Image: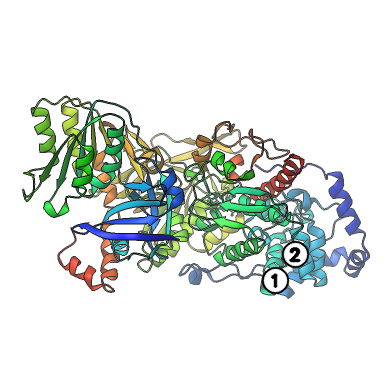
Amino acid sequence: MYRIIFNRPIAERIKHMRVVAPFIASKRRPGNFVILIPDEKGERIPLTIVDSDPHQGTIDLIYQEVGTSTFKLGLKREGDYLYRIVGPLGKPTHIEKFGTVVAIGGGVGIAPLYPIAKGMKEAGNRIVTILGARKKELIILEKEMGEISDDLRVWTDDGSYGKKGLVTHGLQELIDEGLKIDMVLAIGPAIMMKFVTKMAAEHNLPIIVSLNPIMVDGTGMCGACRVVVGGEIKFACVDGPEFDGHQVDFDNLILRLKAYRKYEIESLERFAGFYPEVKTYLQGGVR
Amino acid sequence: MTRQPARFPEELKKKLRARFNEDWRKELRRKISVKERLAIERVAMPENEPMERIKGFFEVNKGYTPEMAMEEARRCLDCANPTCVLGCPVAIDIPTFIKLIEKGDFIGAVKIIKETNSLPAVCGRVCPQEDQCEGHCAYVKMGKKPVAIGNLERFVADYERAAGEVEIPEIKLKKGKKVAVIGAGPAGLTAAGELAKMGYDVTIFEALHEPGGVLMYGIPEFRLPKSILKEELDYLRRLGVKIITDFVVGKTATIEELKEEGYEAFFIGSGAGAPWFLGLPGEELNGVYSANEYLTRVNLMRAFQFPEYDTPIPRGKRVAVIGAGNTAMDAVRTAKRLGAEHAMIVYRRSRAEMPARIEEIKHAEEEGIEFIFLTNPKRFIGDENGWVKQMECIRMELGEPDASGRRRPIPIPGSEFLIDVDIVIIAIGTKPNPLIPQTTPGLELAKWGEIKVNWDTMETSIPGVFAGGDIVRGGATVILAMGDGRKAAYQIDRFLSEKRD
Ligand SMILES: Cc1cc2nc3c(=O)[nH]c(=O)nc-3n(C[C@H](O)[C@H](O)[C@H](O)COP(=O)(O)OP(=O)(O)OC[C@H]3O[C@@H](n4cnc5c(N)ncnc54)[C@H](O)[C@@H]3O)c2cc1C
Ligand code: SF4
Ligand code: FES
């Protein structure tokens, strides 16, 4: 069993959980993820390992409450247990000294971005960070990202914090300033990665993205996580989750992510019947 | 591939001969004449009604009653030269166990089976008996239905469990040596059980959150109830085997790292879990599944109980399964149970070439599964939401036999046609998962990534590391996996006994 050290909100509907998982804590590298099951009847869901403490044997996870599984996680208290965690899974990030790395994180995608950017920083890269979200309340890890960034800029859709605009505007701004960019890292919603990649292509910039398809086992056994990369089918859980953005078929990823939408809503509505706090959220309309 | 001795090895011959000549056996042979025995009809397996059973996931076969088992046992002629034994990959002493059933000694019968088969309740249900023991039965040569060896094996195994008489063998002196078993499928479970009985300190490392391998995530409840697997696992735990789930060897720790933890020998039984896809356009569409994903969602994650369980599975109305092996039958019959109006098998060869067990094909036909033979998909067509809606197929005809001896299917030009579908399940086979090979330097592999072993010892290219089951054979069978696990256990014992500390 995997004991929860803390599970606290860090932004609107976004929580930070620290959990005891000693094997994983000592083995994980930037870019790795875990598959966890909240309770006996739960799904297997992937989450990136944001940080770890091999001495304490703990790992840190950050997630947004969007469906039944993440709401179940959100209801866990300090001292509770997670039913299962397995990992570290996926290929660790290929880290080398590229020069200047632009690290772009959108929404809860900032969480998986952090360990990778940190690894890149430790390898001697200059890190220029762009954080984006719909609004101020959804910006996470600004302080942590700030500590490893040589330059950090925040963009919000509604202008409630930082500059008003999308992360693509942020990238455009850097390009316009004449920054010599050696590598772009982009993690966030599929649609965001698609447009960042498009811009990178226009400017001949190499780009790494981290894909978040639906998974089941996370060990290459089922193919639920298949993504089209360079015209070929790849399994994100073992061949990725990071890929060369220019090769990725984002439109397919976007469609595949919607595969279970109907069921997700059905499941969440049923779950909300047991938990008034979830119900209140649902009444605000599921995005 | 079945590797079986063409002739009786001397030792086996001696054992069979000695028992054949015991007085009680002679007595039984005298009691009923061959002619009378031959006149008995094969006792049919009692089954739940097709229209009832497709409403749920309960087991199709109900099992023999003691009377039925004894009646069927009387059919066995107790041949002096029992060819059925040659057909069994683990050479169970079939006539002795059947004659014990005839005598009414069911517990005695199961003990005979367990001399070489650790999982009789499983094998009695899932072995391809028609290619193995029953296929070699003397009755077949006479043009009659073989003795129902599988049904009898299942009967005594179930009898033993129901009677609560599963014995925990006395564990010999503890050897104080740690052995790691990787993968909790039939190969790993068997190796672990044998090693524990020899006194080793055995730990199984399993990647998924439940042990059992294909028996857990692949073969559905209606064919192999999970309760049987649960009891096998309890038995192992009582033997002192530790099972650590959620541990991916190669990721959570490598074999090298486990060595540092004090494990002195290894058995890799990690199976052939990675699914093949067809490489056709549209395969990335929603609604296209590998059989592994489809069955895992339903069996392991219990998606058939969604939304009580969180994992969903779409309940397709028109489900096409590509392939005709056991996995394909399991997938298509699962789809039927999930409410498919048309649950279809699409197979590029004809009925005669279907690799599934005969019983599965029979059950599928009774349940109203539609078979579309000599047909191969060419591409999958999606709707505006990226969900599969049609499958373009081409008709095939059979040409010359290929390497496998089966006639090769050849597309008929211009015969393309469309099938409406909302779910497609690809069940054309699996290959070994590369996670362990990639993280174990020095491990030699064969053509499709199978781990190479010395077939006499099941040892890999790394001393002290043994392997068996699907990871060395590619997709094979439960009985072969079990047999490998057993053989490897003895070789691990030899290896560790010879090793100087
Ligand atoms: C749907 C289906 C139906 C079948 N029907 C029949 C049938 O009717 N009769 C028959 O004889 N055979 C049947 N088979 C084939 C049979 O199930 C297999 O041949 C058999 O299970 C192989 O056993 P195994 O122990 O080698 O591997 P598996 O049963 O595949 O078990 C391997 C285990 O190892 C685990 N594992 C893998 N990698 C790692 C790792 N890195 N670290 C830790 N654990 C790991 C896996 O999670 C799994 O639990 C069927 C197969 C399928 C898929
Ligand atoms: S284990 Fe399989 S092959 Fe052997 S006797 Fe039983 S059913 Fe036949
Ligand atoms: S999640 Fe099953 S293969 Fe990737």
In the image, residue B176 sits, relative to residue A228, either above or below, namely: below
Quadrant containing the C terminus of chain B in the rendered view: top right
Closer to the chain start, of discs 1 and 2, is 2
| Image side of residue B383 versus residue B501, left or right | left
Residue closest to the eye, B184 or A264: B184
| Chain name for mark 1 | B
Q: Quadrant of the N terminus of chain B?
A: top right
Direction from residue B107 to residue B227 in the image, left or right: left
State which quadrant residue A169 falls in: top left
Q: Is residue B501 above or below residue B125?
A: above
Q: Residue at x 92, y 62 (%)?
A: B22
User: Is A154 in front, or is B215?
Assistant: A154
Q: Is residue A57 above or below residue A165?
A: below
Mark 1 close to ligand 2, CB under 8 Å: no
Instruction: Name the side, left or right, on which A101 lies relative to B281.
Output: left
CB of mark 1 within 8 Å of CB of mark 2? yes
Position above or below: A84 against B440: below
- A249 sits to left or right of B193: left
The residue identified by callout 1 is B159
Dot 1: what SS?
A: helix
Q: Position of residue B24 (x, y in %)?
A: 90, 67
- Chain at numbered mark 2: B
In this rendering, does residue A197 appear at all? yes
Q: Residue at x 20, y 37 (%)?
A: A149
Residue A65 in percent (x, y) is at 25, 59
Residue type at mark 2 is Val
Q: Is residue B76 visible?
A: no
Label 1: how many Cα within 10 Å (few below 14, some 14–19, many 20+): many
**Within 10 angstroms of label 2, few (less than 14), some, or many (20 or more) residues?**
many
- Residue bearing the label numbered 2: B110
